Image (cartoon, rainbow, N blue to C red):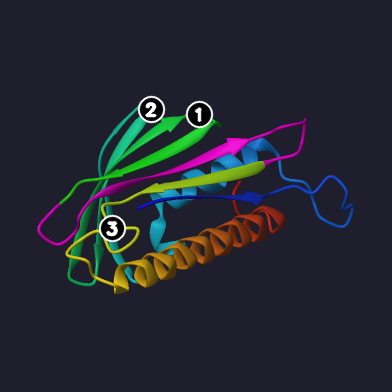
């Protein structure tokens, strides 16, 4: 299944909404990579296994599920999570890309690529399309909630 959506960060037409800088947004997205338990339900343990200038590798325990990710960083542009397939998890990738079509007009584009069937492709299962739409909605809701939490942290000074 491939899925993509965009969340507007700054609304230049809304003076009531505190604008977020690219650097602040980047710090918030990095916090999501390094401390996913603050943004994802069920994360019990996170360990950064290795780190380089433009990448990190982490392990997350979510209930009985152990997930290993390699996270590729393009500073203040994008974060790409590449999840290793395992006996418990099919693997996949997710990218959070900052877009700025005009100065200050920040958006984050979320792109997902998973082995989950989009429609009844596997054994003709009729429930695949319904399940895929449920997963897409869950991804979108999780991303909206993450942006809300990043904004709240920035407004309270919690990302400094």
Q: Which mark is residue 75?
A: 1
Q: CA distance from mark 1 to mark 2?
A: 8 Å
C-alpha separation, residue under disc 1 versus residue under disc 3: 30 Å
Predominant secondary structure, magenta span: loop
Q: Which residue is disc 2 drawn over?
A: 54
Q: Is residue 78 above or below residue 147?
A: above
- Tell me if mark 3 has few (under 14), some (14-19) or many (20+) residues whose alpha carbon lies within 10 angstroms of its own: some
Look at discs 1 and 3 and give the one toward the viewer: 3
Taking 116 as reference, is 8 left or right?
right
10 Å crowding of disc 2: few (<14), some (14-19), many (20+): few
SS class, disc 3:
loop
Kindly check if marks 1 and 2 are in contact, taking CB atoms under 8 A apart as contact.
yes
Nearest the camera: 111 or 58?
Answer: 111
Whichever of labels 3 and 2 marks the residue nearer the N terminus, that label is 2
* Disc 3 + disc 2, Cβ < 8 Å: no
Image mark count: 3
């Amino acid at each position: 299944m491939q899925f993509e959506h965009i969340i507007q960060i700054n609304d230049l037409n809304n003076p009531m909404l505190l604008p977020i800088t690219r650097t602040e947004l980047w710090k918030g997205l990095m916090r999501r990579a390094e401390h996913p338990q603050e943004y994802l339900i069920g994360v019990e343990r996170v360990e950064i296994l290795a780190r380089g200038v433009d990448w990190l590798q982490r392990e997350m325990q979510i209930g009985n599920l152990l997930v290993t990710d390699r996270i590729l960083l393009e500073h203040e542009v994008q974060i790409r999570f590449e999840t290793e397939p395992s006996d418990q998890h099919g693997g996949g990738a997710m990218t959070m890309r900052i877009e700025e079509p005009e100065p200050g007009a920040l958006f984050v584009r979320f792109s997902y690529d998973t082995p989950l069937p989009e429609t009844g492709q596997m054994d003709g299962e009729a429930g695949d399309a319904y399940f895929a739409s449920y997963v897409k909605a869950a991804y979108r809701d999780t991303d909206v909630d993450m942006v809300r939490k990043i904004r709240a942290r920035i407004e309270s000074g919690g990302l400094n």
